[in-house]
Image (tube, rainbow, N blue to C red):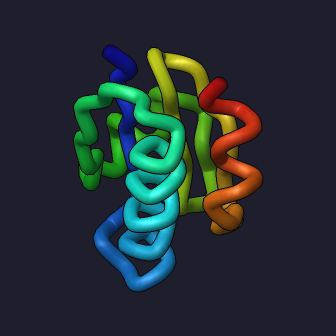
Amino acid sequence: MKKIQILGTGCAKCQKLADNTAQAADNLGVEYEMEKVTDINQIMGFGVMTTPGLVVDGKVLFSGKVPNPADIEKILI
C-alpha cells in the first residue's frame, strides 16, 4: 500500500491535486492511504516551499503545480 500525502493549506489547488491523485491511483488499481498535511512546519520539513505538494512513500514527487491524472499515473507505477 502506498502512502500518499498532499501538502497544502486546503486551497482549491490542493483539493484538485488530491482529486487527480486519487483518480490516478484508482485508474491503476493501486492501494493507497491518503493524508492531507496542512501544518506549514510539516510541509517545510519536506523541503516544499510552494504548495501544493505530492509526496508518495516519503518522497516529494511534485510541488508548486497540479499535474493531471495521466502524469501522476506515470510516477505511481
Instruction: Answer with left or right where residue 27 lies relative to residue 1.
Output: right
Q: Residue at x 37, y 72 (%)?
A: 15
Residue 37, percent from left and from top: 28, 46
Q: Residue at x 34, y 23 (%)?
A: 3
- Pick out the residue farthest to the bottom: 12
Instruction: Answer with left or right where residue 56 lies relative to residue 4.
Output: right
Q: Residue at x 39, y 60 (%)?
A: 18
Residue 50, percent from left and from top: 63, 59
Locate the N terminus by quadrant: top left
Q: Foreground: 9 or 66?
A: 66
Task: Count every numbered label the image shows and give the total.
Answer: 0
Q: Foreground: 29 or 1?
A: 29
Q: Foreground: 38 or 26?
A: 26
On screen, 16 above or below 24? below
Instruction: Answer with left or right where residue 31 lies relative to residue 59.
Output: left
On screen, 25 above or below 69? above
On screen, 58 above or below 11? above
Q: Residue at x 45, y 58 (%)?
A: 23
Quarter of the view holding residue 42: top left
Residue 69, percent from left and from top: 62, 60
Locate the C terminus by quadrant: top right
Residue 25, percent from left and from top: 46, 42
